[in-house]
Image: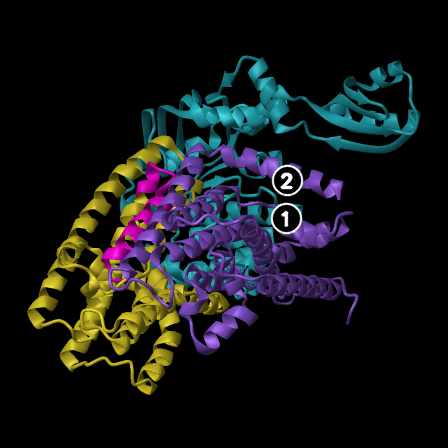
Amino acid sequence: MRRLMRVYKALLQTAWATAVEYRAQAFLWILSSIFPLVMMVVWLAIVDEAGPLAGWGRADFISYYVGAAVVYQFTFVWSTWQWDEDIRTGNLSVKLLKPLDPFHYLFSEQIGWKVFTLLFIVPVVMVIAWLSPAIQYPLSLGRAAAFALSVIAALVLAMLMSCTFGVLAFWSTQVSNLYQLWIGVGSFLSGWIAPLALFPASIRQVAYLLPFRSTLGLPMEILMGRLAWPEIGFGFAVTCGWCVVFLVLYRILWRAGLKRYEAVGA
Amino acid sequence: MRNYLRLLTIFYKNTLVGELEYRLNFWANLALSLFWLTWAALSVRVYFFHTDTIAGWSYPEMLIVMGLFFFMNGYRQMVPEPNLSRLSEYVRMGTLDYILTKPVDSQFLISLRHIGVYNWGDPILGLGLAAYALWRLGRVPGPDQILLFVVLCVAGMVLLYSFSLILQTPTIWLVNVERVDAVVQGLLETGRFPIQFFRGWIRGMLTLIFPIAFMTTFPAQALLGQLNWGTAAAAIGLATLLFTLSSIFWRFALRYYTGASS
Amino acid sequence: MNIIHVDNLVKHYRVHHREAGLRGSVRSLFRRHYETVRAVDGISFDIAQGEIVGFLGPNGAGKTTTLKCLSGLLYPTAGQVTVLGFTPHRRERSYLTQFTLVMGQRNQLLWDLPAMETFLVNQAIYDVPEVEFREMLDELVALLNLEPLLTKQVRKLSLGERMKCELTASLLHRPQVLFLDEPTIGLDVTAQAAIRDFILAYNQRHNATVLLTSHYMADVTALADRILVIESGQLIYDGDLSGLVERTAPYKLLRLTLEKPVNGNDLLALGEIESADGLKVALRVPRRSTKDVAARALATLPIADLTVEEPSVEEIIREVFRKGGDHA
């Protein structure tokens, strides 16, 4: 365990150095993730037309989507693509020769990158939030801690889902596309297209049980103070449950896939 | 001119052969295009749970804009993006030197050499969606509306290309900057929705500076009979202007590259 | 003591077969045609500690496949492989920390950062104590002249410099067994010599066992006491180098570029004609008489250019195969 900590320390340093190296890219990436703000504009136009929806007014939508844009930066994981490439090109072999599970390379890379981009975004957003009367996050210390925890849990879950799809690349060439489908469907059920509160109750019930909400909707609802503690607890339980499911799935597929990789060659 | 057309045929035939090798990809990409189109249509449907019109646009009318967004985005992924995003690689690897020594216009080569064949689903399905939406509305555009539409589409495509080229050209100086196309991609996302959704300075910016309005909203309005020849003329003018500017900028950058200007 | 034991190793693949052209690609959209490639078809050998063994063979002969089986990257179709007492494909951690595989075509170095960063990551992954790490690093830096390279970004290094850094990254954990797959490919002459000297030095200092594949005769001449020749998945020679060369290619190639055409008989007087293409002629000349024949050629023929070459690895191997194989 201590060895793993040392390894992560080294890997995170490298991930950070790489992110710094690619800072121009990071800037462009931030600049181009404009979509949540576009969606926000649409919702504001709707509110102007039809008044508050399910108790959500202009200020709520602004708070939600600005926060969601930040949380999204932190929880969007693209490791599937790396798995796909490594397996397809045979570069996985280079990682396999090392006494370290490839998962750790990818996870540390994600963390490094996210910490780096957030270092820019969070101060900017905090200033905007402070200056703009529309953006309100009624936070107590407890809720802030719950929010932070939920975001970390969201990253872990997103990572596990991404890797589960990633190791499918041992069998399929369409893994990146499959992951896109997963994310696409998930975007409805996570609270991305519309806050979950705006969906009919039946759909909402389903969404509360699926893993997607844990990656965006849950942290945002905690941040906006719209959940009572039992509800927060339930959300965390669902998140943990799905983490276990995907962890198990990932390990099984990884073992089986490795056998296949070694039988077939790169 | 004929020589250039021949060149294009050769370029694209080679790409096609290469792409067909990955047969699963071929079908999968079509399926994926269909998925994202459906996803977009459904996500817009969610908005209309709560209202019948938004800024004067009904659901089918918005679908036309969405369909044209897919058309433009698909075009972007087929032509401007695969070509211009290679510019940084050309400069880094020295391939640009080869390009400049060929007896073919350099702008032609860097802009049309490649084609993203695997994105063929998006433009076709996008137009399909727009046609479906028109059918839902029970509207059949008359011949001059269609003509307006075509003029605006072409103008939009030229604008998108010119814009991408202007953004990519600084790679000649900055070399290591990649994925500048992410900015274009991000801006085009605003084209999913009619320009009327945006207000104030944003609408102005998206009409005159990054002319996204010309790419999806105005062609849609042409089909709906809401556009006049004045706007069309503006579109043609703007497209010509931006194309000329992008060409000039490109040649200016080349002079720097070859050391002609100090 | 045998470090590496290979017993009747077999490795087969299935690949899909495609015709060229547009029609072929459209057809492959709907139907596929598979065939089995017998990459390795039953080879056996043993290697003792401290040996440097050269693994020769033309492209596609099965060299890389064998190395991958020994490193645990591939699961044998049949047969037994044991290295340091481990079964490689189980990929046990204790095995992974004791060997290294360096593939000339692939890199483990982090591209955008200085090589030193990769070294530090490897130190953590292999859990090398600080003192040993510094010792090993200093040794490798000295042997390979790495000092100026350590702080440069890897992508800015030349191919030769990168290879040196790759080797360093692979050896920091002081492995006992080295598998080197085409380590000098694409390098210039100076870099190749440096790598060869280095491998020899490492072997001597640490009594490491080295199995190296190569296309280049020079690699093998400089390093290997023992050669394994593999062709079409089978071992056709296992013995020492001098025996192989002497027996199978007791000749050198004299390449002449003539100033004007000459009588064929004049050429035959000097040696067997290997090939003749206009003014370029290649002659086979017995090793011992190469110098004399070259001198005579210069004296009697109108020669613009003359070079003396070793026969290529392919030729030597072809000769061995033609002679029905030989196991020493």
Q: Is residue C240 left or right of residue C72?
A: right
Q: Which span is picked out in magenta?
A: A168-192
Please tell me which of labels 2 and 1 falls first in the chain: 2
State the residue in front, C261 or B72: B72
Q: Which chain is yellow?
A: A
Q: Which chain is cyan?
A: C
Q: Are marks 2 and 1 in contact (CB under 8 Å)?
A: yes
Q: Which chain is purple?
A: B
Q: Determine whether C136 is above or below C72 in the image.
A: below
Circle 2 sits on which residue?
B11
For mark 1, does the 10 Å Cα neighbourhood hold few (<14), some (14 to 19), or many (20 or more) residues? some
Query: Which chain does tag 1 point to?
Result: B
Query: Which residue type carries mark 1?
Result: Leu
Residue B199 spot, x, y in % from top left = 43, 75
State the residue in front, B166 or C294: B166
For mark 2, does the 10 Å Cα neighbourhood hold few (<14), some (14 to 19), or many (20 or more) residues? some
User: What secondary structure characterizes most of the magenta part?
Assistant: helix
Query: Which chain does tag 2 point to?
Result: B
